[in-house]
Amino acid sequence: MIGRLTGVLAEKNPPQIVLDVNGVGYELDVPMSTFYNLPASGEKTTLLTHFAVREDGHYLYGFLSEAERFAFRQLLKVSGIGARTALSVLSGLSVGDLAAAVAQQELGRLIKVPGIGKKTAERLLLELKGKLAETTGISLRTAVDDAKQDISNALLALGYNEKEAASAMKQLPADIGTSDGIRQALKLLSKV
């Protein structure tokens, strides 16, 4: 119903803002990633919106990018995830980080978000698999390549030489996440 609003930023009270559009003040809840990138109060801005009608009221959510709004809508489709939890996820992780966590099936990244427990994180990983890649441009292949590079960099930073790091990398599963990969690589290297 309301897809985008352009107006003057009247108030900023995290996570809520008021956008004055030709004399009408719209209250919008925004993720912290959007909040931190808003201009100063009194300046003009444009936000993409998601309008929700529930039994207890009508709610507007605002986003600076289409990727954020898309991720928010995908999160709402996950059973047990409401708007507050979806905003919390997008406040704790960028859309790219969320897509990478889902692509790599990294439970630990999601559990770090306030309000997300192990069962909810597992549900998110299961139900979002393959749904965020097309909008963020992060594919499983890209995420796996990034994870392998991060693991290798971590081993080098810990004082292992390139030969030792490469040897450990060859023994790791192809689709391993960063944190699990570092842990397993260190175990392999400690046995040598």
Image: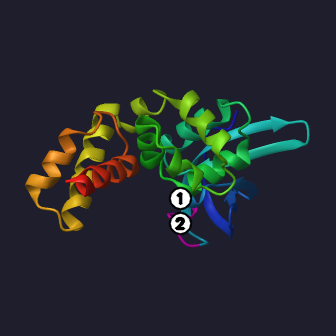
Location of residue 55 (image quadrant): top right
> Where residue 136 sits in the image (x, y, percent)?
40, 38
> Main SS type for the magenta part?
loop
Location of residue 125 (image quadrant): top right
Location of residue 57 (image quadrant): top right
Whether residue 45 appears in this view of the structure is: no
Q: How is the image coloured?
A: rainbow
Residue 76 to residue 63: above or below: above
* Quarter of the picture holding the C terminus: bottom left
* Quarter of the picture holding the N terminus: top right
Residue where numbered disc 2 is placed: 36
Local crowd size for mark 2, using a 10 Å CA cut-off: few (<14), some (14–19), many (≥20): few
> Where residue 163 sits in the image (x, y, percent)?
8, 53
Q: Residue at x 66, y 49 (%)?
A: 116
Q: Which mark is residue 33?
A: 1
- In the shown orientation, is residue 127 left or right of residue 190? right
Whether residue 41 appears in this view of the structure is: yes
Magenta region, residue range = 35-40
- The reply to whether callout 1 and callout 2 are in contact (CB within 8 Å) is yes
Q: Residue at x 67, y 35 (%)?
A: 76
> Where residue 103 sits in the image (x, y, percent)?
42, 35
The residue nearer to you, when weighing 78 against 107, is 107
Q: Which mark is residue 23?
A: none
SS for tag 1?
helix
